[in-house]
Image (tube, rainbow, N blue to C red):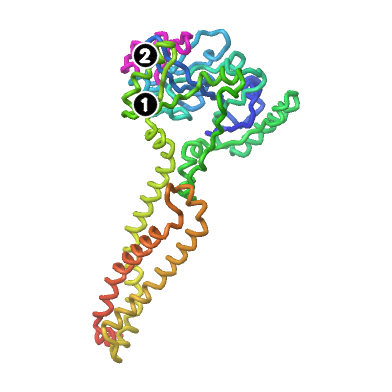
């Protein structure tokens, strides 16, 4: 399974694969777009995150409906009745898991859609908060102003058994080159395909955290006064605008009052995703928090395993040096001398590792800084605490075999030779 991210897509890319099969590497290919329709007509108006997908998407993914059916091949043809599938979570949350609603109409942005199925509980769209899917009809999609471009889409394809992703990517790029030659639009020159395995698409951010422990770079927004914005842009912003309300009271206590005011202005408009600023900031840093929690789990696991490993290594060293230690004690070395010797020799690699770790911290400071908030990557107090903690743990692990070495029966060892 692979997800092709396209810099600029053209509807012909999808049609040519479907109708002319210019590639032999893919069993099927489907397009996915995104939208946020208002659900009306059944209780309070609610704004939902949704997807517009090729009818073959669920066949491509090998997904069947939990209740009803998924989209069928005819559902994304122009002129057919509107249908919609919803996630299992939305089916339970909004409709109480009522199976009798399958086949009934739902109103999305004022248009009627027949609910044909609820998806399985373990299915999620590539945008996790998307809760519904409607057929994508490229030639009739209302979001497209330029009918030769579909640059808001992603393609999901199933690679044939035994075919390498590089071969599939090459064939799709060859098809893209043909389309660039056929289409005069300037954007056509940007047409290209890059394959990403679905596993990497789902786990990519956290997989990178395991290897690099690098959080996503902060995003920057440009703020422009509304009165300086072009009227066409204002009309578009009306569909996606956010409101920020300042209050001296508990913020969420105003949520229902705010929704009521919006409902009075237009009952078909939903005030959704009402959150306090604290909740919003918490969601914003959630990926970084997860990365740090993951790092902490591995750090504590390493700290828990380190004493056992260090103790085993020192114990093995003591066993190998038993004759040498016995000779030292026979010529006058005291148990305290042996204890200090074993501790000294055991701590040398520990201290070398700590020095190397500190050097790495300063060398990778910029990388680590992206994971931290209100603390420096080279915070002295943190570095001192970590260094002393690891020294203490290592010393405790070394003491056990060091004491055994100090209490060795030198005469028995020498006699057994």
Quadrant in the picture for residue 102? top left
Which x, y percent locates residue 4?
Answer: 58, 32
Q: Which mark is residue 77?
A: none
Q: Is residue 307 above or below residue 156?
A: below
View extreme (bottom): residue: 331
**246 vs 368, nearest the viewer:** 246
Q: Secondary structure at mark 2?
A: loop
Q: Secondary structure at mark 1?
A: loop
Marker count (numbered) = 2
Q: Is residue 184 depicted above or below 412 in this figure? A: above
Expressed as whole percent of the image width and height from the top left, the position of residue 160 reads 56, 32
Q: Which residues are magenta?
A: 94-118
Q: Which residue does the numbered mark 1 point to in the structure image?
A: 121
Residue 71 position, x and y percent, is 48, 17
Q: Quadrant of residue 396?
A: bottom left
Whether residue 28 can be seen here:
no
How far, Cα to Cα, is label 1 from label 2?
A: 24 Å
Q: Residue 104 magenta-drawn?
A: yes
Left or right of residue 146, residue 222 in this image: left
Tag 1: Cα neighbours inside 10 Å, few (<14), some, or many (≥20)? few
Residue 96 to residue 162: above or below: above
Q: What percent of the width, then of the height, locates residue 182?
A: 75, 24
Q: Is residue 339 left or right of residue 381?
A: left
* Vertical position of residue 400 compared to residue 122: above or below: below
Residue at x 50%, y 22% (from the top left corner): 240
Q: Which residue is mark 2?
A: 44
Write the residue at 51% across / 41% down.
218
């Amino acid at each position: 399974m692979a997800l092709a991210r396209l810099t600029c897509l053209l509807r012909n890319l999808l049609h040519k694969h479907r109708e002319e099969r210019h590639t032999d590497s893919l069993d099927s290919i489907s397009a996915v777009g995104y939208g946020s329709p208002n659900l009306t007509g059944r209780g309070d108006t609610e704004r939902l995150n949704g997807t517009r997908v090729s009818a073959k998407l669920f066949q491509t993914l090998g997904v069947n409906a939990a209740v009803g059916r998924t989209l069928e091949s005819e559902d994304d043809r122009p002129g057919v009745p509107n249908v919609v599938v919803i996630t299992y979570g939305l089916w339970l949350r909004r409709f109480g898991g009522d199976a009798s609603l399958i086949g009934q109409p739902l109103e999305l942005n004022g248009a009627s859609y027949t609910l044909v199925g609820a998806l399985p509980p373990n299915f999620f769209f590539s945008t996790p908060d998307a809760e519904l899917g409607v057929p994508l009809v490229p030639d009739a999609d209302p979001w497209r102003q330029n009918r030769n471009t579909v640059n808001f889409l992603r393609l999901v394809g199933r690679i044939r058994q035994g075919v390498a992703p590089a071969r599939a990517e090459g064939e799709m790029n060859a098809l893209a080159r043909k389309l660039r030659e056929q289409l005069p639009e300037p954007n056509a020159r940007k047409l290209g395909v890059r394959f990403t395995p679905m596993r990497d698409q789902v786990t990519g951010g956290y997989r990178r955290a395991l290897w690099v422990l690098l959080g996503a770079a902060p995003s920057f927004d440009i703020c422009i006064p509304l009165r300086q914005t072009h009227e066409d842009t204002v009309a578009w912003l009306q569909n996606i605008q956010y409101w920020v309300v300042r209050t001296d009271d508990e913020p969420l206590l105003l949520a229902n009052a705010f929704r009521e005011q919006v409902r009075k202005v237009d009952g078909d408009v939903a005030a959704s995703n009402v959150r306090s600023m604290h909740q919003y900031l918490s969601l914003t840093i959630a990926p970084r928090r997860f990365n740090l929690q993951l790092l902490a789990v591995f750090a504590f696991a390493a700290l828990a395993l380190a004493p056992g490993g260090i103790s085993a290594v020192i114990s093995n060293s003591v066993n190998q040096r038993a004759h040498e230690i016995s000779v030292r004690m026979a010529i006058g070395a005291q148990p305290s001398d042996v204890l200090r010797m074993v501790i000294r020799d055991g701590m040398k690699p520990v201290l070398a590792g700590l020095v190397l770790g500190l050097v790495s911290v300063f060398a990778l400071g910029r990388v680590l800084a992206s994971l931290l908030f209100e603390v420096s990557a080279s915070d002295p107090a943190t570095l001192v605490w970590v260094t002393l903690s690891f020294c203490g743990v290592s010393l405790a692990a070394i003491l056990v075999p060091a004491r055994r070495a100090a209490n060795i029966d030198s005469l028995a060892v020498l006699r057994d030779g």
